[in-house]
Image: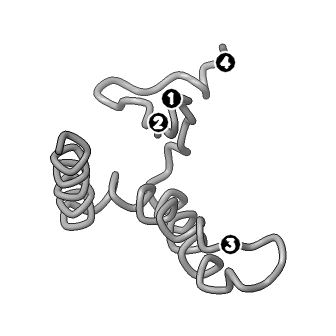
Amino acid sequence: MDQQDRPEAGETQRKIEIFGREFSMPRSRALRIAIGVLLIILGCLGFLPVLGFWMIPLGLLVLSYEFHWIRRQRRRFAVWWQRRRRT
C-alpha cells in the first residue's frame, strides 16, 4: 500500500454496500458529488440502450453520503421498507 493510498488521520475510507458487496468511493468529496450527479443525470436518459433508470437510485445513494437531507430520506425509506417486509 503506497503512502497515497492510506487515509490521513481522522479520514475514513468511504464505502458503499450494495447487495452485500462493498465498493470503495473516491476520497475527493467533489469527485463523489460529481459521480452522484452524473449517475442521476444519465439515469434520466434510461430509455436509451446501456443507460438505465437504475442509475438514479445509485446516484442518490452516492450523494446520501455527502448531504444530510438525502441521507435522512434514505434512512426513512429503509425504515419504511423494513416495516413493510415484516407485515
Q: Residue at x 57, y 35 (%)?
A: 23
Residue marked by disc 2: 17
Q: Earlier in the sequence, mark 3 or mark 1?
A: 1
Say what secondary structure mark 2 lies in: strand
Disc 1 and disc 2 in contact, CB within 8 angstroms: yes
Residue type beneath disc 2: Glu
Q: CA distance from mark 2 to mark 3?
A: 20 Å
Outermost residue on the top side: it is 1
Residue 75 image offset from top left, x and y in percent: 20, 52
Q: CA distance from mark 4 to mark 3?
A: 36 Å
In which quarter of the view is residue 66 placed? bottom left
Q: Which mark is residue 2?
A: 4
Residue marked by disc 1: 20
Residue type beneath disc 1: Gly
Q: Earlier in the sequence, mark 2 or mark 3?
A: 2
Q: Foreground mark, 2 or 4? A: 2
Q: Foreground mark, 1 or 2? A: 1
Q: CA distance from mark 1 to mark 4?
A: 28 Å
Location of the C terminus by quadrant is top left
* Above/below status of 84 relative to 39: above
In which quarter of the view is residue 9 placed? top left
Residue type beneath disc 3: Gly
Say what secondary structure mark 4 lies in: loop
Residue 3 image offset from top left, x and y in percent: 60, 20
Q: CA distance from mark 3 to mark 1?
A: 21 Å
